[in-house]
């Protein structure tokens, strides 16, 4: 959510519904999760799970930030 707000992300297509744990995403974070998944910043912990209630590791956060940097550079 913080990165979404920083990036002034726009609403995205509903793309989190393919994940079996999408219903665990807090209402305030659904738009940000959709934006992050659509822009391939978040890939999930598996093909079926986003794990929205788990704590993110430093490696996961670093990967998200690296992907965001590539997104804004147009790579």
Image (tube, rainbow, N blue to C red):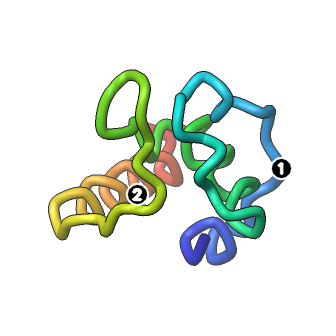
Label annotation for residue 1: none
Give the answer, above or below, for where 13 lies relative to 60: above
Q: Nearer the viewer, residue 36 or 54?
A: 54
State left or right for residue 4 relative to residue 71.
right
Compare marks 2 and 1 and give the one earlier in the sequence. Answer: 1
User: Residue 21: percent from the left, percent from the top?
Assistant: 53, 39
Q: Residue 43, located in which quarter of the rendered image?
A: top left
Label annotation for residue 11: 1
User: Residue 61: percent from the left, percent from the top?
Assistant: 29, 64
In contact (CB < 8 Å): disc 2 and disc 1: no
Label annotation for residue 69: 2
Marks 2 and 1, how far apart in space? 20 Å
The quarter of the image holding the N terminus is bottom right
Q: Residue furthest left?
A: 59
Q: Residues within 10 Å of mark 1 (few under 14, many from 20)?
A: few
Count of number-bearing discs: 2
Q: Nearer the viewer, residue 39 or 26?
A: 26
The quarter of the image holding the C terminus is top left
Q: Nearer the viewer, residue 10 or 59?
A: 59
User: Residue 48: percent from the left, percent from the top?
Assistant: 43, 25
């Amino acid at each position: 959510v913080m990165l979404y707000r920083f990036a002034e992300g726009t609403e995205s297509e509903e793309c989190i519904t393919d994940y079996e744990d999408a219903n665990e995403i807090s209402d305030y974070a659904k738009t940000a999760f959709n934006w992050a998944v659509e822009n391939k910043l978040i890939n999930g912990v598996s093909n079926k799970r986003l794990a929205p209630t788990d704590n993110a590791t430093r490696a996961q956060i670093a990967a998200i930030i690296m992907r965001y940097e590539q997104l804004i550079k147009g790579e």
